[in-house]
Amino acid sequence: MRIISGSAKGRVLKSPKGRLTRPTLDSTRESLFNVLAFSGLEGASVLDIFAGTGALGLEALSRGAANGVFIDNYTQSLLQQNIALCGFDNKTEILCMEFKRALARLKGRSFRFIFADPPYNQNLVNNTIVLICQYGLLAPDGLILMEHSHTEEIPDSPLYEIIREKSYGKDTRISIIRCRKEGE
């Protein structure tokens, strides 16, 4: 697993031993960031929930995002190593805690891009989206990029809308979501 483009291009990220994380494949990440290229990563604040190796947030920083917050309850040391490897120590914050507590702690801050890649089929997808919207963590022009299993449906909601979905391989889907504004 490597950084695909930008200032840290080619850096090979450390991965955990075992099956603690399920990193987003390079090809999937490249496709995702090709879509985001038109949305303005330059100077953006990003949030990477269920960060694992930090590949999504680090790719965004490499491509010009100003700063990033990484949430993962298990991989703090790995995240610190990968952040240092890419030279982004001064642009990042790690919250090593359960995601609900971390999102509550971030209330009052906003992010242009929020990446979320929760463990598949554990009923975390919809809870994560709802908390992001309820805490107002997404900037008005921001996007949530939710990686999830094909079997996990995201229902319609007055809080958010799916603006694009794309499947990758047999089991992965990425939904691009925006929070609805009041009165929409």
Image: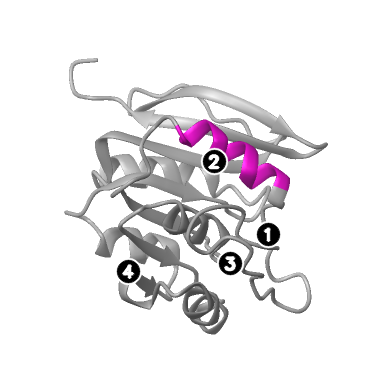
Residue type of the residue flagged with mark 3: Gly
N-terminal of the two: label 2 or label 3?
A: 2
Which numbered tag is attached to residue 143?
none
Q: CA distance from mark 2 to mark 3?
A: 18 Å
Magenta segment range?
27-37
From the image, tell me which residue sits under label 3: 52
Q: Mark 3 and mark 1 in contact (Cβ < 8 Å)?
A: yes
Specify the principal SS of the magenta part. Answer: helix
N-terminal of the two: label 1 or label 3?
A: 1
On-image quarter of the C terminus: top left
Q: Nearer the viewer, mark 1 or mark 4?
A: 4
From the image, tell me which residue sits under label 1: 23
Q: Residues within 10 Å of mark 1 (few under 14, many from 20)?
A: some
Residue type of the residue flagged with mark 1: Pro
Q: Position of residue 66 (x, y in %)?
A: 30, 57
N-terminal of the two: label 4 or label 3?
A: 3
From the image, tell me which residue sits under label 2: 33
What is the count of numbered marks?
A: 4
Q: CA distance from mark 2 to mark 4?
A: 20 Å
N-terminal of the two: label 1 or label 2?
A: 1
